[in-house]
Image (cartoon, rainbow, N blue to C red):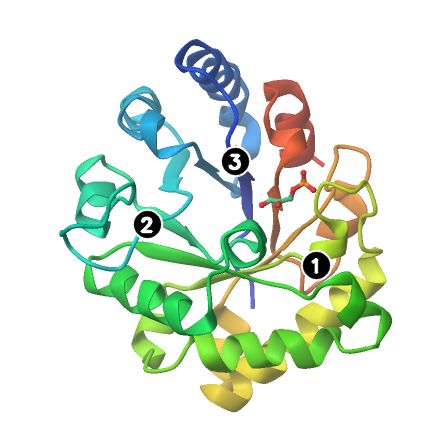
Amino acid sequence: MSRRVIISGNWKMYNTTAEAKELVEGLLAGVKDLGEKEMLIFPPSIHLKEVVAQCEGSKIQVGAQNMYFKEEGAFTGEISPTMVKDAGADYILIAHSERRHVFGETDELINDKVKAAFLYDLKPVLCIGELLEDYEAGKSKEVCRNQLVEDLKGISAEQMKQMVIAYEPVWAIGTGKVATPEIAESIHMSIREVLKELYSEEIAELVPVLYGGSVKPDNAAGLLVKPNIDGVLVGGACLKADSFLGIANA
Ligand code: 13P
């Protein structure tokens, strides 16, 4: 069966308003040639509304990088699922490794955010991935499995049909040390095994699993050719239209 292929870009904490506008203009010029592939971008939330407006009517889909799970309240500095919706975004990135490891998000909080995404009709892209020490100890699959079990608690099979998983080994993020296509493929297969165990074969086959971590135009093709790698989540290389489109066309 053929799964969706999603080329996604996480801008992280980069781009002023003018830079954001220029980047989206560049992407809009190239996105027409993508065929069946989907493009999804995650700008900083302060730019969401403008980026959504700029992308309207195009193939580019937009998501927020983070949100809190409550609808509103005294949570200074946070944004809510309804605000993300209100800004016109359809997707929400949840549990990016920087959220887990720089901001200390726990699996319990992440699970609340996944539930909130579905409650407010946002499509989650759930990030999982192991630290270097876990990788070196041969625990990559075990760590990813535990994260999936904890983060997906209470999520139904029907909801899982809207889910996207991103495997981002922490040791590969921003380090230039991309996982080899063979390593990534093997972890992606194990992620499908967990989805099969938690849900069904159908769900395991349906859910797109993206790879993230030092993806560049010159290594994207080798990853994307693997049967269980359904797209990428790009950081540094998505900040220039040429390089992000280079990955998308790989
Ligand atoms: P880099 O592509 O810069 O390694 O970042 C990956 C990432 O964290 C995307 O979410």
Residue density around tag 1, few if under 14, some if 14–19, many if 20 or more, within 10 Å: many
Q: List the residue tagged with mark 3.
A: 12
Contact flag, marks 1 and 2 (Cβ < 8 Å): no
At label 3, the amino acid type is Lys
Q: Quadrant of ligand 1?
A: top right
Q: Earlier in the sequence, mark 1 or mark 2?
A: 2
Q: Amino acid at mark 1?
A: Pro
Residue 218 percent location from the top left of the image: 81, 34
The reply, left or right, for residue 62 in relation to residue 190 is left
Horizontal and vertical percent position of residue 162 = 36, 63
- Circle 2 SS class: loop
Q: Kindly identify which residue carries mark 1.
A: 169
Residue that badge 2 annotates: 67
Residue 119 at x, y = what percent?
Answer: 20, 64
The response on whether ligand 1 sits within 8 Å of label 3 is yes
Q: Nearer the viewer, residue 34 or 16?
A: 16
